Structures are given as structure tokens and as C-alpha cells.
Image: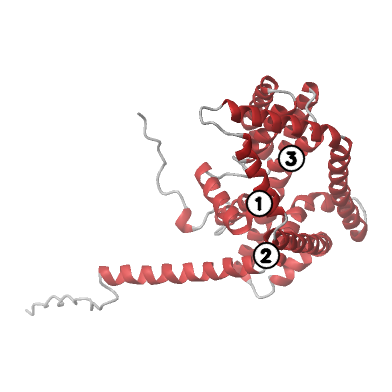
Amino acid sequence: MHLRRSPTPVTPRTSAWTDPYGRLATRCLQTVLVVVVLGGIVTAATTLSLVTIPVLIALIVASALHPLVGWLRRHGVPSALATAAAFVAVLAVLAGIGWLLVAAVVGQWSALQDSAVDGLQQVQDLLHELPIRVTDGQIEDAVDGVVDFVTSARFGAGAIAGISAVTNFVTGAVLMAVVLFFFLKDGPALWEFLLRPFVGAQYERARRVGNRVVTTLGGYVRGTAAVAAFDAVAIGTGLAVLGVPLTIPLAVVAFVTSFIPMIGAPIAGTLAALVTLVSLGPVQAVVVVAIVVLVNQVEGNFLQPVLMGKTLRLHGLVILVGLTAGTVLGGVTGALLAVPLIAAAWGVVQVWDGEDEPAVAWRQKRRETVPVG
């Protein structure tokens, strides 16, 4: 009888890269490479902001108008005519907003000047009543300092920089309009051209990603625009009833700032309250603040859940960090673009492995619980 000898266990070979410390080093190197690549992409995007920002704005606007263009095409409207109709509608809305702003400012400019003079006089009287004595000589010195700065070479350099900024803005606006037209006209064909290297499962994934990005961006813009329109009408009506000057420009500011979550409403409310304080007095300013708070409560508790739905499924902390990063990288434009881009990126994660299958690293492995007490 032969006894079978049990096989000798084979000890796995270890190296400097397979022990726990080596695996940690590998992850650190991978993280550094990812950060370097992302940093390079962000640096290139900010350096070429004159190109990247108009293209991103055109993509977001085209995503919002995609259902309209598709509906027109499905009802027999030729592709070129449907594109032209949507494009002209966007230009008409922008031109109408600009005309309202200019007409309102020009029509109420004299009243605004009188209010500003009265406001400065109130501020000067308040300074005289402070515990720390502020003399007329100190005020005159401060005014002289402002005048000296305005007439200095530094102010001239700033004015030249302002002219350059205006030129860049006009260039970016023209580029955005051209890119928007082609996105509306040939957007699906352009996307299919970019997907030519992909086949099989990779092609299906790319299709899902594109559809989700367009759906998320379009839903975000349409929902936010509806909420912003409500804010502008409600706040503008309240200001008009109180007789606040520059009602239309303040309503337009409320509309635009509503596209910046969390901080847009306080900005618009503060500006409206300051104008009311200077023109009408503190009591009316408090009423304006109450109107803005009430409007924002209605917006946050009723309108956004209905109009936005699940388009913006982001935690408030994520939105705050994204707004901060967008503001640092792109100023006001970065703040406007940060949240929809983050929402689109999160939408991509949610359909990475299937229509309702998020990427493996982001799948929920256990129920999230909120600690009580």
C-alpha cells in the first residue's frame, strides 16, 4: 500500500510591490498620475478659456434645446429650418433681456442718480454719528484718493484691461453662437463621428454616456430656467409694488443669479435690499428681504422638487465645493458652469455599466444610515 504524500504548500513569492506597503505605494503612484492628468486638463482648459467656455456654454444650451429641435424634425420641419428656429429663439430671448436692461436703466437713470446722492449723504451723516469721530477732512481725503486713482496710470492700465476683456467677451459670444448653431444642426452626427473608434460594449457605453449627459444638462437648464423665471417675476412684482427703482434690472439679476445654487439668491436679495435702502429707506428694505426669503422658500420646497426631479441628485456639500472650485478657476462663468458639469459627470457614473448600473466603485454596497441624536 502506497501512501500519497500531500503536496508541499507553495509559498507565494513576494516582492517590494506585492507586500502591503508596496500596494500602498502603487496606489499612491496611480493617484499621483491621475491628479497630474486632471491638473493638465484643467490647466489647458483654463489657458484656452476663450475657446473652452464658449464651447461648454454652447453644449449646455444645445442640450436644453435638443427636445425642441427633435420635436420640430419629427413633425416634418426640415432640419435646417428647425435648427434656425431654435437658434433665432435663443437670440431673441437674449436680445429681449438686453433691451429690457438698457431701457430700464436709461429710463430711471436720473432717479438713480438722485437716490445715489441721497444715499451718500445718509452714509456721511451716519459716519458723523459713529463713536469714532470721522471728520469732513478725512472724508475729503478719501474722495481725493479715489480721484487720484482714477486719474492715475494704474487706472488707465485697468481701463485698457477692461477693453481687452470686452473684446474677449465679444469674441467668445460670437464663437459660442457659431458652435451652438452647429451643435443644434449636426449634434447627433458629430457625436456618432466621435464614436467611430468604439465597437460592441464600448460603443453602447459611449452612447449611454452621451445620452445621459445631454439629458442631464438639458433637464438642469430647463428646470433652473423655469425656477429662475418664477424668482424674477415674484421678486420683480414685489419691488414694483413697493416702488423700488430699477425693478426690471433687479429682476433680471434675480433671474441670472438663480442659475448659481445656494449663493445666487443671497446675492440678488442683498443687491435689491441695498437699492431699496438707498432709495426708499430701511423699512422697505426689510420688506424686500422678507419677499426674497419667502420666494426662495417657495422655490426650494415646491418648485425645485417638481421641476428638477432627479436631474440634480447632488449633496449640498458637493455643490458648495464645486461652486468654490468653479469660481476659483473661471470666476462668475465658472460658478455658473460648475454645477451642471458636476451633475453631468455624476450622471455618467450612474450609467457606466448599464442603463441602471453605476460604475462598480460607486455601487451602493450597504444601506446608508443617518445617525440619530
Numbered badge on residue 49:
2
Q: CA distance from mark 3 to mark 2?
A: 24 Å
Q: Quadrant of residue 206?
A: bottom right
User: Residue under circle 1?
Assistant: 332
Numbered badge on residue 75:
none
Of pointers 1 and 3, the one earlier in the residue sequence: 3
Instruction: Answer few, some or many: residues within 10 Å of disc 1's Cα (few below 14, many 20 plus, some between 14 and 19).
Output: some
Q: Residue furthest front?
A: 137
Q: Position of residue 321 (x, y in %)?
A: 52, 49
SS at circle 2: helix
Q: Identify which amino acid the numbered label 1 is placed on.
A: Val
Q: Quadrant of residue 312?
A: top right
Q: Identify which amino acid the numbered label 2 is placed on.
A: Ser
Q: Quadrant of the N terminus?
A: bottom left
Q: Residue at x 8, y 80 (%)?
A: 2
Total residue callouts: 3
Q: Residue at x 63, y 67 (%)?
A: 45
Question: Is 189 in front, or is 162?
Answer: 162
Q: CA distance from mark 1 to mark 2?
A: 13 Å
Q: Quadrant of the C terminus?
A: top left
User: Residue under circle 3?
Assistant: 253
Q: Position of residue 54 (x, y in %)?
A: 74, 61
Of pointers 3 and 2, the one earlier in the residue sequence: 2
